[in-house]
Image (cartoon, helix red, strand yellow):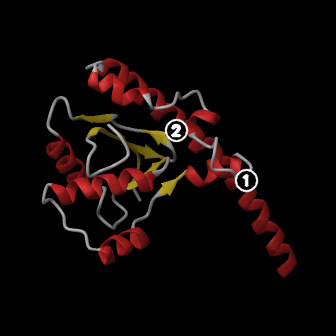
Amino acid sequence: MTEYYFDIETEGTDPLMDKIITIQFQELDGGKPVGDFRVLKEWEEDEKKIVERILDAGILDSNWTFVPIGNNLRFDIVFVMEKAQQYGLREWSAGKVRYFFFTKPMIDIRSVLVLMNEGKFKGSGLDAFTGKQKGVQVPIWYSERKYDEILTYIETEKQETIALYREVASLLGTFGRRKRMRVEEQEA
């Protein structure tokens, strides 16, 4: 299994109307970054090209060679799917989309954030539990061509997401081992 930190930045929330600004990913080994942090930038290439490049990396393949790890992955992946279809790079029927989400391995920390927020969705963003700021400024920076601001935001978001992922994985791993031991003791 090859894990990758994965995220995108967009102009808004509607993949039919809004543009993907950046697509970023980095290979992880046990939650630790390895290799280069790749940021595909719409302002250096066009949107179609960065979508093609992430498709080539395997984000939409239902296999274990690109297992995305991130926050709110359904949003990011659906956005990429919609753009891939708009550009004629992939066709998605409702059945294919369902099949994809049933077969694509991914680790989304969004559910954990909701649980950390006492089961409430409101106030459960990554910014509530880390040093990451809200991303509302990204489209503004993009329109003002403040690309360095976007890149700084992306780097901070990556670091905070990976740190939280590693901490949660460690805590839940400890909890899981404890639960398994109790079950084994009861069965003995």
For the question of whether residue 66 can be seen, the reply is no
Give the quarter of the figure containing the C terminus: bottom right
For the question of whether residue 142 can be seen, the reply is yes
Give the quarter of the figure containing the N terminus: bottom left
Callout 1 crowding tier (Cα within 10 Å): few <14, some 14–19, many ≥20: few
Residue at x-position 34% and y-position 37%: 35
Give the image quarter of residue 103.
bottom left
Residue 153 place in picture, x, y as percent: 42, 26
Tag 1 residue: 174
Residue 58 place in picture, x, y as percent: 27, 57
Compared across the picture, whether 72 is left or right of 62 comes to right
| Label 2: which secondary element | helix
Residue 87 place in picture, x, y as percent: 14, 55
Tag 2 residue: 161
Q: CA distance from mark 2 to mark 1?
A: 20 Å
Q: Earlier in the sequence, mark 2 or mark 1?
A: 2
User: Do callouts 2 and 1 mark residues in contact (Cβ within 8 Å)?
Assistant: no
Callout 2 crowding tier (Cα within 10 Å): few <14, some 14–19, many ≥20: many
**Vertical side of 162 occupied by 148: above or below:** above
Could you tell me the amino acid type at mark 2?
Thr
| Label 1: which secondary element | helix
Residue at x-position 18% and y-position 41%: 47
Q: Which mark is residue 35?
A: none
Could you tell me the amino acid type at mark 1?
Thr
Give the image quarter of residue 86.
bottom left
* In the image, farthest residue toward the bottom: 187
Residue 73 place in picture, x, y as percent: 44, 52
Nearer to me, 45 or 15 = 15
**How many numbered discs?**
2
Compared across the picture, whether 117 is left or right of 107 comes to right
Residue at x-position 27% and y-position 25%: 143
